[in-house]
Image (spheres, rainbow, N blue to C red):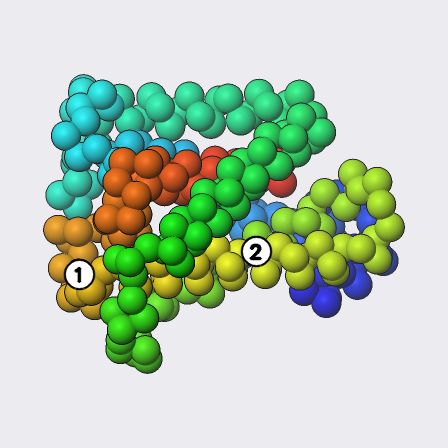
Amino acid sequence: MYGQWHLVQKYPNAGGGFTFTKMCFGRNTAYVCGWFLVVAYLTNVPMNSTAIGLIVDGLDESAVILKWGLHYQVVGYDVWLGEMLLAMGILILFGILNILGAKKAGIVQTILAALLGISVVTLTIAALVSSKTSLANMAPWWGFHKSDAIAPWAYVGFDTIPQAAEEFKFSYKKVSGIMIVAIIFGCFVYTANNTITAATLENWSDLIVESASTPWLLLTAAECLLGTPGKILVGVAVSSAALSYPCPDQF
C-alpha cells in the first residue's frame, strides 16, 4: 500500500500498475504487465457479472426466471441462456456507463458501496440484538479450511485507487488514507459476515463440510435472524459487491 501511495505522488497518471511499470522499467516490461492485467480482467469482470444469476438462484432455489434455454454443462453445472443474457446485459450496461465518464461511474459505485455497507451494518445490528446468536456457536475458535487459501484475494481492490490518479481532485497525500479506509471497510465486511454466520448457525462447521448441499451459509444465517428481509439484505450486499467490480479501471 505504501509503495502505491508513493508511486501515485511520483507518477500521478491514470493506469495504475501499468503506468508505474512503464515509468520505472520501460515500455517492454509494461507491455507484458499490461497483457497480464488484461487477461486478469477478462476473467474477473465476467465472473462477477455471472454471479448475479447465482445470487438469484440462491435467494430462491425454486426460481426458474433465468433457467431457460439450457446451453451446456461445465463440471456438472448447468449453464442457462437466461443467465448468460443477464450477465451480458450487465456487462453492456456498465460498459456504456464507463463510456459516459468516470464521474457517472463513480456515482454508481458510491451508491453500490453505500448499499453494501448499510446491508452489512443492518445484519450486524440484527445479530447483536437477536437471541438466536451465541458466542458459544463460534467454537472452534481456531482452525483452517481449504477455502482459506483464497482469503488473501478477498482484500484486493484498494490497489485500483491509483488507477484513477489522473482524475483526483484532491491532494495525492490523501491517497494513503483512502486506501487504509478501503482495507478497514473490506475487513469489517468479511469479519462481520463470518461472525454473523458462525454466531447464528450452531452447526456451521459441519455445514462447511456439507457445503455442496448448503452452499450459502450467510444467507441461511440471515434468514434465521430476519426471515425474508434478511435474505434480501444479503442479496443486496452481495449484488452490490459483485456489480461494483466492473468499474472504470477494469474497462
- Could you say which is closer to the camera, residue 240 or residue 198? 198
- Could you say which is closer to the camera, residue 187 or residue 31? 187
Residue 89 visible here: yes
Amino acid type at circle 2 is Phe
Can you give x and y, in whole percent of width and height, for residue 175 in the image? 76, 55
Badge 2 crowding class, 10 Å Cα cut-off, few under 14, some 14 to 19, many 20 or more, is some
Q: What residue is shown at x 17% (from left), y 51% (from top)?
A: 214
Quadrant of the frame with the C terminus: top right
Q: Is residue 50 above or below residue 144?
A: above
Q: Is residue 138 above or below residue 23?
A: below
Q: Is residue 167 left or right of residue 246?
A: right
Which quadrant of the structure image shows residue 65? top left
Read off the residue under disc 2: 185
Which quadrant of the structure image shows residue 178? bottom right
Read off the residue under disc 1: 207
Residue 137 disc label = none
